[in-house]
Image (cartoon, rainbow, N blue to C red):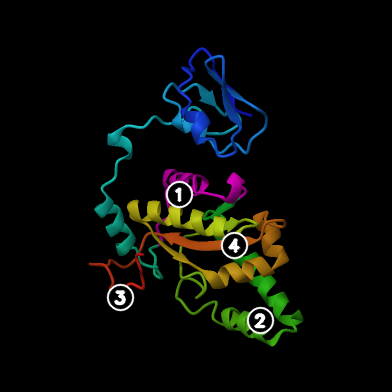
Amino acid sequence: MIELNTSLCTGCGLCVADCIQKNLFLQNGHAQARGDCFLCGHCAAICPQNAIRIPEYADDPTIEYTPETFDLPAENLLNTIKFRRSVRSYTSQAIESDKLMMLAEAGRHAATAKNTQHNRFVFVQKDLDLFKSIFWKAVEEAISTENDPRILRLLKHFYEGRNDLPKDEYLFRNAPAVLFIGTDNALDAGLAAQCVELIAVSLGLGAMYNGYLCRLAASLPAVREWLGMQDQPPAAVMLLGYPAVRYARTAPRRTDDVEFR
């Protein structure tokens, strides 16, 4: 539940006007709440006096806006988006813990439908070898029991190619870390993954969305159990690490299929 500090509130009405659920109103010159809301945080973010808090959230206190902290040249951000590549070759260097924390923060602050914030983020780096042993054992067992020929071909293809690279399996692309995002809403996972990738690029890291690994992990009960995603299947999976290749420029794209009306 939100907390309103009436000693700080000036009754400006900005939070009332911006409230998505029309849960706030002005009374006796101060903002008041009618009842429960889905805690989107708009009121806390817009209040000039910092009179509204959501104490149950981790980001308390929040960060004050300053141009030096938040203003980002649009052209630089666009160039970052253009320059990103799906990295398929990584060095063996582990990702530092502080950088992993920044990636997690980026994902956690991504938009979610109805502000559910139900995404689960599992970064597998320290225990990656353990995870792979569990994963490949589950794949092997699934091969012996799978009846769908299409799924069976997929399982066999990756299982037989698991040692194609000198240091790692073809599916994992020798990445030192893998991020699994579990959620009931695939769009929420996609939004979070995009935020994670933008921060990854800014930190000198590379990333690749791995749809095959996501599909396999979601279909293997032992893997979901290890990830703690029995109730929320992996909806996005990203390989992460320091790129072993360096791209000198952006890659060309097709002509935009865009219409402005």
| Res 72 → quadrant | top left
Residue at the left extreme of this rendering: 248
How far across and down, in percent of the image, does residue 209 sit? 48, 66
Compared to 245, does 180 lie above or below?
above
Check disc 3 and report its element: helix, strand or loop.
loop
Q: Amino acid at mark 4?
A: Ala
> Residue type at mark 1?
Leu
Placement of the N terminus among the 4 image quadrants: top right
The circle on residue 103 is 1
Residue at the spot 75% in from the left edge and 84% down from the top edge? 147
Residue interval drawn in magenta:
92-118
Query: Residue sitting at 51 percent across and 12 percent down?
Result: 7
Position in image of residue 158 (x %, y %): 57, 79
Residue type of the residue flagged with mark 2: Ile
Mark 1, secondary structure of its residue: helix
Q: For the residues marked 2 and 4, what is the alpha-carbon distance in whole angstroms?
A: 18 Å
Q: Which residue is mark 2?
A: 151
Given this view, does label 2 or label 4 mark the residue nearer the observer? 4
